[in-house]
Image (spheres, rainbow, N blue to C red):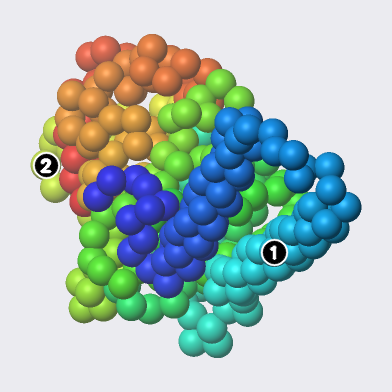
Amino acid sequence: MIQSPLSPAGPQAAAIASLSTVFFTICAVVYVLTIGALLWAIFRRRQATDDAPQTTRRLGVVVAAAGVVTALTLVALTVSDAAAQRRVNGPPSPDAMLIEAIGHQWWWDFTYQGSPLELVSSPNELHIPVGVPITIKATSRDVIHSFWVPNLTGKRDLIPGMTTHLSLQADEPGTYRGQCAEFCGHQHAHMAFLVVAEPMEQFQQWIQRQRSGAPQPSNDEQKRGHDVFMTGPCVMCHTIRATSAGARFGPDLTHVASRRTIAAGTLTTSREHLADWIRDSQAVKPGNRMPPNVVRPENLDALLTYLETLQ
Ligand code: CUA
């Protein structure tokens, strides 16, 4: 799906797209009429009657009429803008599903309500059921970010220390790209995310799987990778539920291998990309909060094998 506000896939984005059509059409007509009048004035020959008092009076009427038409046009644009605002930012539907979005430098955390032990955190991948109104409760942990999924809704700034709400809904299943839309530092451009809209049944299966903790390592290599994680620096920033790793500074890795991308849409998820990232994430996304060389080279393979089990 092309990331564009002109291919709306939900009611909020449709309101914005039709508003832009209204503005574009009216402004195009105004432009053509204005340029036409200007050209007519430039190329028209002077005539003997131009200085006659009747002509001056007639021109006065024409200018007044143009003024009234201009004012009415501006009122029409204002009213259509207010109507679109209402559709985009109106009060959220009472049966909307609530999902929390937290902006970090430079990744997104999406959490779904549940008991603390089953708290689903889906970094950089927002899953929603199709046709269900969604309320996003949004805030930021550090600087101002902006949540923007052009195909689904308008932009909304995430302000540290403040909570805002926005509504969105996907009418068609699909994957929609979202992007931080407020300059937030070095890796602002690499602060993307995906919205995966799927039929309710599939969404339920997804969330059911996400609610479960990480599987236990089942062979020696996986066990060794698990120990590398739990005894190294990884555990100081990341959570893997159902293990002793519970830090919340970096993204939750309980189901990292089930996500399509790592590093906020920077790389597709694969063993090679995970290896590149762990070896030297600063070469991939300079300035990100993960230090380089967190794992000894001889331990990397085991760690990757363990991470791949986190489906
Ligand atoms: Cu976050 Cu730009």
Q: 220 or 184: which is nearer to us?
A: 184
Please identify the residue farthest to the right as the structure is shown: 53
Residue 58 badge: none
Please identify the residue farthest to the bottom as the structure is shown: 94
Q: 206 or 223: which is nearer to us?
A: 206
Q: Secondary structure at mark 2?
A: loop
Kind of residue sitting beneath label 1: Val
Q: 2 or 60: which is nearer to us?
A: 60
Let me know if residue 180 appears in the view.
yes
Residue 219 badge: 2
Answer yes or no: disc 1 within 8 Å of ligand 1: no
Identify the residue position indicated by label 1 in the image.
Answer: 69
**Considering only order in the chain, which callout, 2 or 1, is on the residue closer to the N terminus?**
1
Please identify the residue farthest to the front as the structure is shown: 48
Q: Secondary structure at mark 1?
A: helix
Kind of residue sitting beneath label 2: Asn
Q: Is residue 184 above or below residue 133?
A: above
Let me know if residue 128 appears in the view.
no
Residue at the location (64% across, 49% down)? 157
Q: Find the distance from the CA under tag 1 to the CA under tag 2.
A: 78 Å
**Which callout, 1 or 2, points to the residue nearer the camera?**
1
Residue at the location (27% across, 54% down)? 175
Residue 147 place in picture, x, y as percent:
53, 50
Please identify the residue farthest to the left as the structure is shown: 219
Q: Is residue 170 above or below residue 218?
A: below
How many C-alpha atoms fall within 10 Å of the one at disc 2: few (<14), some, or many (≥20)? Answer: few
Residue 237 place in picture, x, y as percent:
51, 36
